[in-house]
Image (cartoon, rainbow, N blue to C red):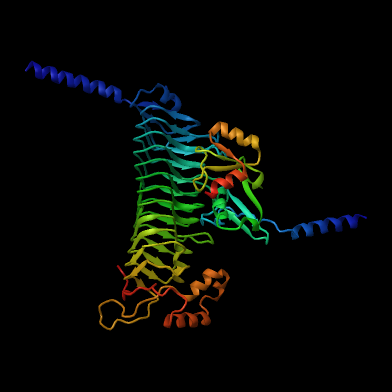
């Protein structure tokens, strides 16, 4: 019985390893796919993975959005962004709340930060002023 | 005569009172004034504070009037990682000769060892900073000088680090003779115009030695950038003059001697690029004059990506790079004229110092590597030498007009 459990656990682990995962960013040595800058900012980095399983990493959410203008977004499986309040932690970009505030600089000058928690975003907005966006609104804004 | 006497007395009185004013407030352990904050509180405008040797455990020191703070024998200000250490919010402040350590790390506020906010005519010199988050942070502050400071960060594997010297919306500032190491960016300029950066040594930084973002009309000369993630990055900026700098040993997959992106009307002259993965990586940059630079033993001397127009390359030395130039498109209205190429095998029958056969700096192999990076393993193989030679004899793939008509026979001195 015990052996079965262990085998079961191993099977789950192996199968989950087969799932295509986003390649983690090596901060300090990976470069941004769009602007070639070295990725060091754990609060503003972003990535996406295509349906074929290829990962693209960016030093800032604005770089990812600018890159998306040049490709067909239908080919993308998932988007992720750094959570501003929890540096180094990636969250689902389509569910995040975004703040553009002149008082919070981001690596490529868009003053754009992402929050997984809407409350945290609102608090940051009241502390620093600025405008909140959803993922869809943000995409519209960067298409122009 | 009486008039003269009264004038003399008046001057004497003036001198005595001036002398009284000029007497500095002395701060030390056994003095009347024991802390720097206290000294600032009791000081009058334009006073001088003399801080004696010792350790001062203070943070959030607010300098809100024009003062001169002088440290004698490098007194230590220890912030004990509680937050920002010195904040200057007044014009005309001088800070001279301090050893400042233990700035607090914060993810939401960029704590700095010394922060200057909306002030003018500041002078920060002879300051040593260690255990810092941000070092010297100039925020909307202009007409000042950051001179001869030593900033030593410990951003080796810790990526939540700040920049050594940061300028944000600051203009007309001189940054010279500083040593910056182990920060995220050694010196970082964002929205800062008319800045002069001279004789600094920026080494071992995590990202860039020097970094421009949205900054115009700046000049940097005679600096050394070594062993950084990349030497210098100039992005989205206009009218930048870069002269006499040394870019050395910036190695790694995302490392460059210099990274140019979206910059216009610049002058790049008499610099040395030695042993970098890529000497200069250029993208979307126009009307730039490259003159008298040395490209020595780099993987790529110059790598040109899309949308670069009207650039001129003349009088440069390309010495022993694996690839001198790499180009990813056919478009070329850039001019290569009168450079020295160590790979040039032509002859000079009329002995005028200029090779009689034009030199084609782009190898076919560099083209292949651009398309398929993995093919780099074939570098220096006989097969590649053969196809490079055949391409040189009758160019088919490399840009037809990309050539140096007047390659020099001897190095430019």
Count of marks placed on residues: 0
Q: Nearer the viewer, residue B2 or A108?
A: A108
Residue A24 position, x and y percent, is 64, 54
Residue B199 position, x and y percent, is 35, 51
Q: Residue at position x 88%, y 55% from top?
A: A5
Residue B131 position, x and y percent, is 52, 42
Q: Nearer the viewer, residue A120 or A24?
A: A120
Q: Quadrant of the C terminus of chain B?
A: bottom left
Q: Quadrant of residue B296?
A: bottom left
Q: Nearer the viewer, residue B314 or B31?
A: B314
Q: Quadrant of the N terminus of chain B?
A: top left
Q: Residue at position x 44%, y 25% from top?
A: B30
Residue B311 position, x and y percent, is 36, 63
User: Is B305 placed above or below B1 here?
Assistant: below
Q: Residue furthest top?
A: B2
Q: Residue furthest left?
A: B1
- Left/right placement of residue A85 relative to residue A129 reads right
- Left/right placement of residue B311 relative to residue A82 reads left
Q: Residue at position x 60%, y 50% from top?
A: A46
User: Is A27 placed above or below B345 here?
Assistant: above
Q: Nearer the viewer, residue A61 or B319?
A: A61
- Left/right placement of residue A15 relative to residue A31 reads right
- Viewer can see residue B223: yes
């Amino acid at each position: 019985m015990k052996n079965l459990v262990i085998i079961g656990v191993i099977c789950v682990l192996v199968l989950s390893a087969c799932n295509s995962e986003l390649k983690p960013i090596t901060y300090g040595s990976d470069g941004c796919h769009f602007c070639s800058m070295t990725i060091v900012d754990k609060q503003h980095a972003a990535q996406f993975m295509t349906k074929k399983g290829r990962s693209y990493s960016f030093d800032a959410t604005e770089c990812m959005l600018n890159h998306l203008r040049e490709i067909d977004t239908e080919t993308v499986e998932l988007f992720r962004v750094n959570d501003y309040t929890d540096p180094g932690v990636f969250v689902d970009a389509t569910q995040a709340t975004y703040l553009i505030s002149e008082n919070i600089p981001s690596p490529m000058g868009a003053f754009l930060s992402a929050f997984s928690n809407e409350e945290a975003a609102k608090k940051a907005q009241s502390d620093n002023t600025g405008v909140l966006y959803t993922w869809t609104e943000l995409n519209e804004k960067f298409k122009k | 005569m009486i008039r003269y006497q009264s004038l003399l007395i008046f001057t004497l009185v003036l001198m005595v009172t001036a002398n009284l004013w000029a007497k500095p407030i002395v701060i030390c352990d056994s003095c009347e004034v024991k802390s720097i904050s206290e000294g600032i509180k009791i000081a009058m405008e334009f006073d001088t504070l003399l801080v004696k040797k010792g350790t001062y455990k203070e943070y959030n020191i607010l300098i809100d009037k024009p003062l001169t703070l002088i440290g004698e024998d490098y007194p230590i200000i220890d912030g004990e990682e509680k937050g920002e250490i010195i904040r200057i919010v007044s014009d005309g402040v001088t800070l001279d000769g301090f050893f400042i350590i233990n700035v607090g790390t914060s993810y939401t506020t960029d704590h700095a060892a010394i922060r200057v906010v909306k002030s003018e005519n500041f002078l920060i010199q002879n300051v040593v900073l260690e255990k810092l988050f941000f070092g010297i942070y100039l925020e909307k502050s202009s007409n000042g000088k950051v001179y001869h400071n030593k900033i030593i960060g410990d951003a080796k594997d810790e990526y939540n680090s700040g920049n050594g010297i940061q300028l944000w919306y600051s203009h007309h500032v001189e940054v010279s003779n500083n040593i910056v190491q182990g920060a995220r960016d050694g010196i970082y300029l964002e929205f800062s115009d008319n800045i002069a950066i001279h004789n600094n040594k920026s080494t071992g930084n995590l990202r860039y030695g020097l970094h421009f973002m949205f900054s115009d009309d700046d000049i940097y000369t005679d600096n050394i950038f070594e062993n950084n993630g990349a030497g210098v990055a100039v992005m989205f900026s206009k009218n930048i003059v870069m002269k006499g700098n040394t870019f050395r040993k910036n190695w790694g997959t995302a490392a460059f001697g210099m990274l140019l992106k979206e910059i216009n009307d610049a002058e790049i002259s008499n610099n040395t690029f030695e042993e970098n993965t890529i000497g200069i990586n250029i993208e979307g940059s126009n009307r730039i004059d490259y003159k008298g630079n040395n490209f020595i033993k780099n993987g790529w001397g110059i790598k040109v990506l899309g949308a670069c127009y009207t650039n001129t390359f003349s009088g440069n030395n390309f010495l022993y790079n694996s690839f001198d130039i790499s180009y990813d498109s056919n478009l070329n209205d850039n001019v290569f004229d009168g450079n020295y190429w160590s790979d040039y095998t032509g002859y000079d029958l009329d002995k005028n110092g200029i090779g009689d056969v034009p030199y084609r700096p782009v190898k076919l192999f560099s083209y292949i590597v651009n398309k398929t990076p993995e093919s780099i393993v074939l570098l220096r193989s006989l097969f590649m030498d053969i196809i490079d030679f055949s391409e040189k004899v009758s160019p088919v793939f490399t840009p037809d007009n990309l050539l140096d008509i007047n390659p020099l026979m001897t190095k430019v001195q």
